[in-house]
Image: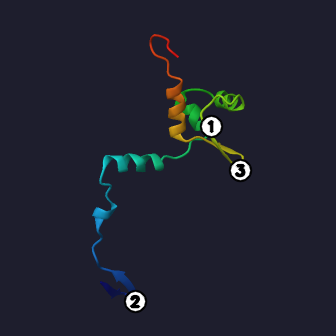
């Protein structure tokens, strides 16, 4: 229902918050993945405890995680970084 409030229209109906709630854990996980920011090379180096030049060299050799280049800026999706790390995991027995 709309009513006039100091010359402006104001909506007095209560919002339906149940629509905004995510119902399942899968929806919550999907939403959190979609909302993760992209990492730049500095951020990736900081998170992994390595140097920016390490990741630049990895890109040049095409050995690093998948990345995005847009207007000269390099960005990494966290999911691509995680996949790359998992693919390079070595067990305690030294399996590759």
Residue at the image point whose x is 57% and y is 35% from the top: 44
Residue at the image point whose x is 31% and y is 64% from the top: 19
Q: Which residue is mark 2?
A: 7
Question: 29 or 5: nearer the eye?
Answer: 29
* Element on which disc 1 rests: helix
Q: Residues within 10 Å of mark 2 (few under 14, many from 20)?
A: few
Q: Residues within 10 Å of mark 3 (few under 14, many from 20)?
A: few
Percent across and percent down for residue 45 are 59, 32
Percent across and percent down for residue 31 are 41, 50
Percent across and percent down for residue 77 are 55, 42
Spatial separation of the CA atoms under disc 2 and disc 1: 52 Å
Residue at the image point whose x is 62% and y is 40% from the top: 67
The earlier-in-sequence mark between 3 and 2 is 2
The earlier-in-sequence mark between 2 and 1 is 2
Residue, far top? 93
Total residue callouts = 3
Tag shown at residue 71: 3
Give the side of residue 74 with respect to residue 77, left or right.
right
* Element on which disc 3 rests: loop
Q: Are marks 1 and 3 in contact (CB under 8 Å)?
A: no
Percent across and percent down for residue 95 are 49, 14
């Amino acid at each position: 229902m709309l009513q006039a409030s100091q010359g402006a229209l104001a909506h007095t109906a209560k919002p339906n918050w149940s629509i905004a709630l995510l119902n399942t854990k899968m929806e919550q996980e999907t939403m959190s993945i979609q909302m993760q920011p992209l990492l730049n090379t500095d951020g990736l180096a900081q998170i992994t405890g390595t140097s920016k030049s390490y990741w630049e060299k990895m890109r040049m050799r095409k050995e690093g995680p998948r990345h995005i280049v847009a207007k000269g800026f390099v960005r990494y999706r966290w999911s691509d970084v995680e996949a790359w790390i998992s693919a390079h995991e070595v067990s305690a027995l030294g399996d590759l």
